[in-house]
Image (cartoon, rainbow, N blue to C red):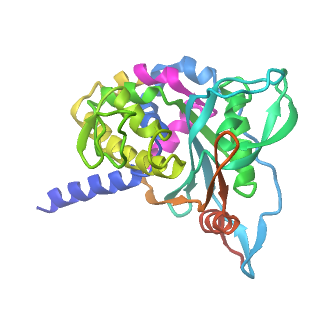
Amino acid sequence: MSNHTSHGEKKQKRKKILGGIAIALAIVITVSVALFIIDAWENNQGDVPVAVEKDTTVSYNGQDYKKKDNVQTLLIMGLDKYEGDISDDSYNNDQQADFLMLFAIDDENSTITAIHINRDTMAQISVLGLAGEKVATVNKQLALAHTYGDGKQTSCRNTAEAVSKVLLDTDIDHYISVTMDSVPAYNDLVGGVEVTILDDFTGVDDTLVKGETVTLMGEHALNYVRTRYGLEDSTNNTRMERQRQYLDALIDKTQHCVEDDEDFVIDSVKLMSEYMVSDCSVIVLQELFEKISTYSFEEIRVIEGENKVGEKNMEFYPDDESVKEIIMDVLYTPAN
């Protein structure tokens, strides 16, 4: 009985650890186990962002705080096609960061906390010239930061810079991006993902009926995590809820696949490697995998704010106090 209980507790703990990780990271976890078979991928990685030394003591609510020691941050981006207009005289591409989540990996306390960032957040974004240099700054949706650059490392770094500004100049140590068109491919590789539909998709995808429990397959999985326009609530808030729900179910299904099929990891590597971009080397990814597998997952923090209808798109204005509270809780500790 004790062995059975121990095994059950371990499975439940692992599910809790992974439950808050973005769709992109769920794939990366599986891929990182066998990255040694794709050496070419490692050779194509960009430079690791360089952290700038600065005064890390700040005052909050009358108390002095300092940055926690031994905490590294990892930005996860889920990329989707962008159909809007971007400047012809800038260095750009058609991929926007539709999903954004920052992970704070605390080595001292062996914990992981996630911050789910609304892609509609209005932010100061660098416009890059044809040579990749910064030529201007615009106030646009955070998701559009990725449209400036090569669609790979340059765009990821530009997005990381914009996210850092939103989060009070928080250093972004590493990033991983995965294109959203990988979702149906990976979804079907695990045999589909079961969810209870949270929104009314009538007229958008009639197979997704609110309140019904279904196994998502193919494009229906992508519709479920991506769609917002045409729904009763077209803000990004309900979509973020669906993404977290889907992720939890996807992680559970992935675990079963890994346990039941010894070839699953290699198969997923072959399928998913072409969708990924990261500054992480194979060694760094393996280290992250080990930490994610053993550290305690604390929670997903969501920044509060106000949704507004802009001239062309939905706009999200984060509450300053909400941002400060989350950053202080996650990345800082009271100074002695």
Question: Where is residue 219, by image quadrant?
Answer: top left
- Which quarter of the rendered picture does the C terminus lie within? bottom right
Q: Is residue 108 above or below residue 89?
A: below
User: In the drawing, does residue 78 fall left or right of residue 279?
Assistant: left
Outermost left residue: 1
Say which of 189 and 79 sits in front: 79
Assess whether residue 286 is covered by the magenta stretch: yes
Number of numbered callouts drawn: 0
Q: Is residue 279 above or below residue 76?
A: above
Residue 171 in the image: state x and y as whole percent.
71, 51
Question: Where is residue 213, by image quadrant?
Answer: top left
Say which of 272 and 230 sits in front: 230
Residue 38 in the image: state x and y as whole percent.
49, 19
Residue 304 in the image: state x and y as whole percent.
59, 62
Outermost bottom residue: 62
On the question of residue 46 being in view, the answer is no
Say which of 250 and 263 sits in front: 250
On the question of residue 184 being in view, the answer is yes
How would you classify the magenta stretch by its main secondary structure? helix
- Residue at x 71%, y 23% (from the top left corner): 150
Residue 331 in the image: state x and y as whole percent.
64, 62
Assess whether residue 94 is covered by the magenta stretch: no
- Residue at x 51%, y 42% (from the top left corner): 287
Question: Where is residue 260, by image quadrant?
Answer: top left
- Residue at x 31%, y 34% (from the top left corner): 206
Q: What's the magenta region? A: 270-293
- Which quarter of the rendered picture does the N terminus lie within? bottom left
- Residue at x 15%, y 56% (from the top left corner): 4
